[in-house]
Image (cartoon, rainbow, N blue to C red):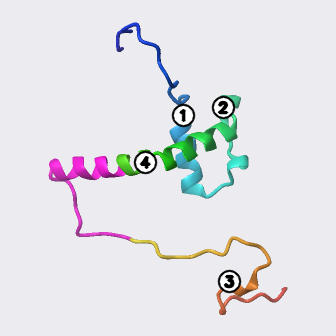
Amino acid sequence: MIPFDGTKLTKPPPPAGVSDYILYVLHTGVQWNQLPIRRKEIHWSNVYKWHLKWSKDGSYKNLFEGSVRRLLLDHKLDLSILHGDGSNTVAKKGDLALATLATSIKQA
């Protein structure tokens, strides 16, 4: 535990578990408002606000670059296998112009 030095915190830290909820959304693709919150510990909109804040202030970029740097310094960075995802998904309903031509749009 860090001893209190008497200075006032200007911004409260995020509630526990926020990063887990953000990772869940990013991994599953679930809508923010459909996020399954355990024991109503935090509202989904607050989880989204933390995600938005960290996206805008560069926190995710810093986390990624720091992780890569640590792996490099520990000689554990393996670039022999590198995966990239260039897939696209049509998310707007009703916009057939964006759909892949090979996609069947006929009703069964």
Say whether disc 2 or disc 4 marks the residue closer to the N-terminus.
2
38, above or below 70, in the image: above
**CB under 8 Å between callouts 2 and 1?**
yes
Image coordinates of residue 11 in percent, x first then y, are 51, 25
For label 4, the crowd category at 10 Å Cα-Cα, with few meaning under 14, some 14 to 19 and many 20 or more, is few
Looking at the rendered structure, the kind of residue marked 4 is: Gly
Circle 4 residue: 58
Q: Secondary structure at mark 1?
A: loop
Q: Secondary structure at mark 3?
A: helix
Determine which quarter of the picture holds residue 2.
Answer: top left
The circle on residue 17 is 1
Circle 2 residue: 42
Q: Which residues are magenta?
A: 64-83
Image coordinates of residue 52 in percent, x first then y, are 57, 47
For label 2, the crowd category at 10 Å Cα-Cα, with few meaning under 14, some 14 to 19 and many 20 or more, is some
Q: Is residue 72 magenta?
A: yes
Q: Label 2 vs label 3: CA separation?
A: 37 Å
For label 1, the crowd category at 10 Å Cα-Cα, with few meaning under 14, some 14 to 19 and many 20 or more, is few
Circle 3 residue: 98
Left or right of 9? Residue 76 is: left
Looking at the rendered structure, the kind of residue marked 2 is: Ile
Please name the residue shown 22% across and 57% down the image: 77
Say whether disc 1 or disc 3 marks the residue closer to the N-terminus.
1
**CB under 8 Å between callouts 1 and 4?**
no
Left or right of 30? Residue 78 is: left
Say whether disc 4 or disc 3 marks the residue closer to the N-terminus.
4
**Which numbered disc, 2 or 4, marks the residue closer to the eye?**
4
Q: Secondary structure at mark 4?
A: loop
